[in-house]
Image: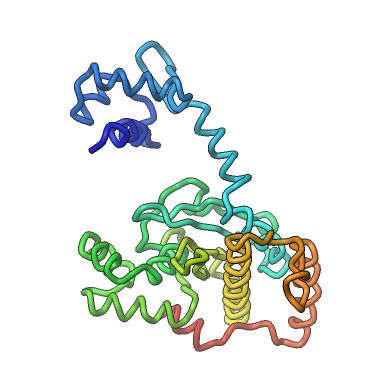
Amino acid sequence: MTTSDRVLSVLGLFTVEQSQWTVEAAAKELELAVSTAYRYFRSLTRAGLLVPFTPGLYVLGPAIIQYDRQMRLLDPLITTAAPVMRSIVPLAPTHSLLLLCRLYRDQVMCVHQEAVGRSDYAVSYERGRPLPLFRGASSKVILAHLPMRTVRSFQMKHSEEMARFGLGADWEDTKLRLRQIRAAGICITQSELDIGLMGISAPLFRPDGAVIGSISLVLPAKAATRRVVNAAAKIMTKASAEIHELLMMLATGHHAFDGAEKSKPHRVRSARDEGRHRRSTSSKLSSRGLMHAPRAKARQAQE
C-alpha cells in the first residue's frame, strides 16, 4: 500500500457509525505508528478534510462540503441527467421520487433526487449513502450490466445475500436472473429496501458503453397499477437513452444543449424545450391510452 493509499485510509475511518477519531485510535485501527498517523492527520487537516472538534478529537472538515458542491455543479452525470429528470417530473406519478444513482466501488450511491409532489415516506437511497449492489432496483439493474467476471467475483463474496434477494442460489441461476434484467432493459422490485415502496430502474452508460449508474422511479406500491408500472417503465427507458445520448455529445466535444442543430439535420431540443415537449406529448399519449411500456418487459423484470 502506497503512502497516499494509507493517508486516504484515514478518511475511510470516518463513518456514520463512528464520526470522531483520535490519532491514537486511528493508528491502532490501521496498524500504523502513532508518529505516522500524526503526519497523516496533519496533512488532512491542512487540506481541510479533517478538523479538530475538541483537543485530540477529529471530525470531517469543510473541504468535504466544497468538493460535494463542485460535484453537484460539475459532475457530467449529474449535470446531464438532472435536467432530464426535471423534464419528466410532470410525467411521473404523484408522490413519487426520481433517483440518479452511481456505481461506487462495489456499491451504489444516490447522487441526485427529484421529488414529484410531496411524499410522506423516506427512501433508503439517500443522497451520499452507499448501498449494496444486490438489493433494490437501482442497484440490481447496474449489477446486471457489469462484466460477468466482475459479477462472478462479487457473487462469490455475497452469494447468500444475492440468493435472499432473488438473484439466484448459484452462479448459473444468477447469470439467468441478470440476463433477464438485461433483456428487459429495466428492473422492478418491491419492498426490498423500504416496505411498501416499488422501484422501477433503467441503467445508465458512459460514452464508452460501460455501465455508470441508474435512473429510477420510486413510488408507493399501492399506487403501482399495471398501467402506472408500464408507463413508468417506458419513461425510465427513454430517459436512460436520452441521458446516454447527451453524455455521448458531451464526450465528443459538443455542448449537450447548444448548437446541435448545426451538426444534425433535426434540431436537438434544449432541456427547457424538451420539458415542454414531454408535458405536451404525455398529455396526448395519456388521453389516447398509448403511454405504456411493453408488458412483457415489465413482467420479465418483476420475475
Along the viewing direction, whichever of 134 and 261 lies nearer the viewer: 261
Left or right of residue 242, residue 285 in this image: right
Residue 67 location, x and y as percent?
53, 37
Residue 145 location, x and y as percent?
40, 71
Query: Number of labelled discs?
Result: 0
Quarter of the C terminus within the rendering: bottom left
Along the viewing direction, whichever of 202 and 147 lies nearer the viewer: 147
> Which coloring applies here?
rainbow
Residue sitting farthest toward the top: 55
Q: What residue appears at the point 57 percent right and 75 percent down from the top-left corner?
A: 237
| Visible residue check, residue 296 | yes
> Which image quadrant for residue 210?
bottom left
| Visible residue check, residue 198 | no
Left or right of residue 285, residue 229 in this image: left
Q: What residue appears at the point 52 percent right and 70 percent down from the top-left corner?
A: 202
Q: What residue appears at the point 48 percent right and 24 percent down from the top-left corner?
A: 48
Left or right of residue 64, residue 168 in this image: left
Quarter of the N terminus within the rendering: top left
Q: What residue appears at the point 77 percent right and 70 percent down from the top-left corner?
A: 261
> Which image quadrant for residue 19?
top left
> Which image quadrant for residue 250?
bottom right
Along the viewing direction, whichever of 267 and 277 lies nearer the viewer: 267
